Image (spheres, helix red, strand yellow):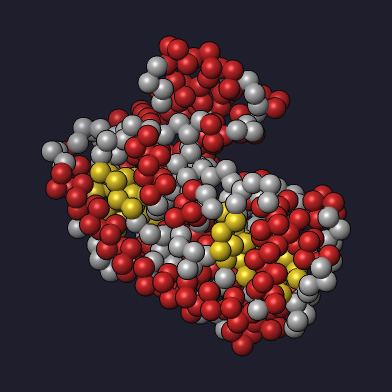
Amino acid sequence: MRIAYFSPLPPKRTGIATYSKHMLKALASKVDLEVFDHGETEDIGLPVHDYEEHPSLLSIAEQCDACIYHLGNNPTFHSRIREVALRLPGVLVLHDAVLYFLAAGRGPGGLLREMQACSTESSETLAKSIAFCEEVPDGNVLRHPRPEAQPVLRSVISSARKLLVHGETTAKLAREAGYEGAIGVVPLLCYPDAYSEVDKTLLPQIRTKLGVGPDDFLVGCFGFVASTKRPEAILRAIAQLVKCGLPVKLMVVGIGEDIVPLVRKYGLKDRVITLGFVSDSEFQELLAAVDAVVNLRYPSMGEASATLVQALAHDKPCVVTDHGWFAEWSEDHVSKVSCGENEAKEVSAILSSWIKNPKAACAIGVRAGNFVKERHHPDRVASMYVDAAKETVNNSETHLSGSNILCDSGSWMANHLANRTHQVMNDIL
């Protein structure tokens, strides 16, 4: 079987790029792959077709048995994938159930049109859509304070031959958005090659270099830093532990919002380590070096967290929000907190219990790690991807190579240029 695979790839700073690097390695032993991305890519052991620079290369995708598209919420990495997926339907891997920012990346005009296209009563909701767009500060739709209120899913998922999601929460949201096709719930894969390569004898040195003492309990927060990751609640929890005299430090790994003002607010300058963006190998080493991970998320965009899966694969006890995809995890494998007024207090209580009883924390981590290494193993997940792709071939009335969606490279170029023109118009609007 020959599959066209569309996804951002490293060195792009998105977890989906890292995810696909590992997924492609697992898929390569099962099917023939044609890989598509745009811009700079690292060597992944397979040729990569830059379909933005050379649109005619998309004729290769037409000749494949099936297409797999990874769709996330970042317009920089996923706008082109969205365009192709609409023209050449296939298996759509939905990483986020709220695609507001993907639509907002097309400008106010593009966002408004997308909102209307996703509405079942567009004539009645036009005024509401305009009012929603006007809520943004300085007219910048990428800074809307309530993106979760406009998931704008319907138009992009409607043409997919099959959806793959990482949890029942996202599947439910896709159904509510009007998707009537087949939906497969597939676990996020873990990266055994990555975590097994960490030299654990070096972990004491890594901690020392970070300024972490042998008696310090190091809590890690990994991934893009945003208000939905609840940084202030986490810092309040750390401040409460410090007030109780407990030897705790917090390490924040990732780019995004500046948390320095919050660190100052809670007087935690000597207790918080901020590292910004790091390489994949450093990311794994830092995961291995912490004593616990806090991975909160509210409000949820329907997304899963590859970071949580990697942390559990390192046998780390994890604190998550009892909301969205995270709520689907068993309390045998993670500790959950509410997203209400007691959020920081609950995080503090869990971490306090682990600091005082590290053996119990270790037991939780090992139990979760064993579960993840089996259920989320790349070979198992890759087989589920292949089965999904085969279903789209068997269930489609017309083979992809017979499709007239992309008649030839010239027609694709025309469509491509038209889309670029529309984007310019969106910016003007």
Position of 56 with respect to 389 (left or right) is right
At horizontal 83% and vertical 61% (from top left) the residue drawn is: 268
Please say if 376 is above or below 14.
below
At horizontal 75% and vertical 77% (from top left) the residue drawn is: 216
Q: Which quadrant would the C terminus be assigned to in this image?
A: top right
Please say if 422 is above or below 16.
above
Q: Position of residue 242 (x, y in %)?
A: 81, 66
Looking at the image, the residue that sits furthest to the bottom is: 201
Q: Position of residue 8 (x, y in %)?
A: 46, 51
At horizontal 43% and vertical 76% (from top left) the residue drawn is: 370
Q: Can residue 50 be seen in this snapshot? A: no
Q: Can residue 154 be seen in this snapshot? A: yes
Position of 127 with respect to 205 (left or right) is left
Position of 103 with respect to 137 (left or right) is left
Front residue of this view, candidates 187 and 64: 187
Marks counted in the figure total 0
Q: Which quadrant would the N terminus be assigned to in this image?
A: bottom left
The quadrant holding residue 181 is: top left
Please say if 123 is above or below 335.
above
Front residue of this view, candidates 130 and 45: 130
